[in-house]
Image: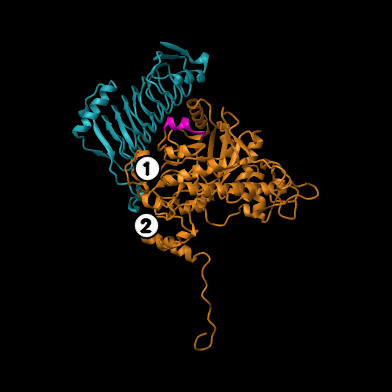
Chain colours: A orange, B cyan
Amino acid sequence: MDSNNIPRTVPIQSATFSNPINAEIRRAAATGIYDIRGGGAKRRVPHFDDLLFLGASISRYPLEGYREKCETKVTLGTRFAKKPIELDIPITIAGMSFGALSGPAKEALGRGASAAGTSTTTGDGGMTPEERGHSTKLVYQYLPSRYGMNPDDLRKADAIEVVVGQGAKPGGGGMLLGQKISDRVAEMRTLPKGIDQRSACRHPDWTGPDDLEIKILELREITDWQVPIYIKVGGTRPYYDTALAVKAGADVVVLDGMQGGTAATQDVFIEHVGLPTLSCIRPAVQALQDLGVHREVQLIVSGGIRTGADVAKAMALGADAVAIGTAALVALGDNDPKWESEYQKLGTTTGAYDDWHEGLDPAGITTQDPELMKRLDPVDAGRRLRNYLKVMTLEAQTIARACGHNHLHNLEPEDLCALTMEAAAMARVPLAGTDWYPGKAGF
Amino acid sequence: MQTYDLEANGLRGLNSALQELNGSTNKTAWEIVNPKGSHAIAVGLNSPVEVTVKGSTGYYCAGMNQQATVRVEGSVGPGVAENMMSGTVIVDGDASQYAGATGHGGLLVIKGNASSRCGISMKGIDIVVHGNIGHMCAFMAQAGNLVVLGDAGDALGDSCYEARFFVRGSVKSLGADCIEKEMRPEHIEILKDLLARAGADAKPEEFKRYGSARKLYNFDVDNAQAY
């Protein structure tokens, strides 16, 4: 109240011009450059958390948790490849580049994935000997930049992933900033040390699905039709992209939603372009079913997979496997609270650190600084990743058994319900307690 | 001389036979007849053999070549010698888009003209075009040499890095951050060697050199309009 005892209005923060928004306006005004960061979308979007499993009931009986088997193996690339990839678990490691990640971090990913019986994936910048040496199954990414691309490495790969897009920035290229360009990274990419290295948004020698079909033919001819060809797309038009990937001759479609991470991209791109992972799966599966190739052309889903429940939900919606990136880095040690004092020196805090492009990662993962890199023991970190992958698999098995399934692939949409209208519409499963979802006929 | 009828025997048999060759083979000379514009002819070779294609090809002829010499007695479709690592590819006719794209090494010679995006993202390959080249050639070119005896189209060398471009004729326009540069004695020597190896009848002194101004190597908001 003022001196006349008249009540004053309380200060009201604008929902439109919130403190974070205003801070970003001030930062942009001071620097003249958009905000670049790593990771995926941080905004709240409909996700797997908005789905629940129904579990067994009178109409279905569950499997005994510790006595009855629930299989987890998955085979990828059965359509055309002479040597499909056989994995013990349906959780793979997504593509992350040497350059964005340190050599020890790549080694740790290979160690952890191999110990868990799954594959890891190269990234922009080519294949390192450490990565190949420590990865039982290694997928070689074929990217627009073609940094480090050579036929010798291509022939060493267990599968080739033609990257058309990724969920964090569908339609966008990449930028590895100069501070992360060490001598070794520069040499692998045939560029001077210390400059910003741009990765193109389109492939240099093909445009459109008809060209892609011929490009895949070339890759198969060079590798004697031995290894599977994946096509990775960012989640934007999942039905048509999946259909076109199948038409172009893909063995496997990798579909990455907007929660999927990146090493470095504009924040405005990460938060405002692309679809939530949850909304991508059913249209992609529908495309595969319409073409009569569901399960023949495998679908790998990525973007925000964190737990065995997420794995089970993605598979219940029709995915054959999932891929993890950000979660794998956290398992290695990214954003660990033990580095809190150092995160604070960088102006951030545990859990929020996303300036992976700056090369100052206290955890020694997203850096090329020799001293910081030493902080990550690839053996210990690989063990943590293996443990995490095993736990996720056990969690997914627990749910599958509870739903009465003896294989994770037998999970189905009928096992699910949705907590929100949005999730029900996107996942095309009934709103909890009803038999209806938005878009379903008969309402 | 080994003769392979592509129409009769198929692509897989051809590439399989060529890819199986190693340095000790006596089958060092191959002739491919009836190519009829097929794609992915003679891709992934990795031995010092000589392959002659008797006619025109489709996409990606001699893609990712290592060591081999591939001659096309005709014209080629998009992406000839894409990502070549070493060896030599000679095209007697014209080349479609993306000739020599992302090539890391070796020599690509095009006796006719090359279409747009010749040398896109080149990473060490040498390309000699006897005729003209189209627009956006050497976009984001990183390393190597592009020699053009004729004219260059729009936006030559846009956003290029350390690659060198030598053009004898006119350049319709230069791309972002690409400028004309001084032709020093070492460049004359590089050019003399390339012209000789490409069988080109031209004098190095007739060419102008272009390359990166290196202004876009690190992001600066004041250059935003250039991107």
Point 68% across, 56% down: residue: A419
Q: Disc 2 is attached to a residue of which chain? A: A
Q: Residues within 10 Å of mark 2 (few under 14, many from 20)?
A: few
Label the magenta part by its dominant secondary structure. helix
Residues A192 and B128: in front is A192
Position in image of residue B14 (x %, y %): 48, 18
Specify the label residue A185 is tagged with. 1
Which numbered dot is residue A433? Answer: none
Q: Position of residue A138 (x, y in %)?
A: 50, 37
Q: Relative to the observer, which residue lies in front, A301 or A97?
A: A97
Q: Residue furthest bottom?
A: A4
Considering only order in the chain, which callout, 1 or 2, is on the residue closer to the N terminus?
A: 2
> Residue lying furthest left in this view?
B185
The mark total stands at 2
B160 is within the stretch colored magenta: no
Q: Quadrant of residue A49?
A: bottom right
Q: Residue at x 49, y 42 (%)?
A: A110
The answer to whether A58 appears left or right of B62 in the picture is right
Magenta region: A150-159
Q: Residue furthest right?
A: A58
Q: Amino acid at mark 2?
A: Gly
Residue that mark 2 sits on: A32
Question: Is disc 2 placed on a helix, strand or loop?
Answer: loop
Looking at the picture, which amino acid does disc 1 mark?
Val
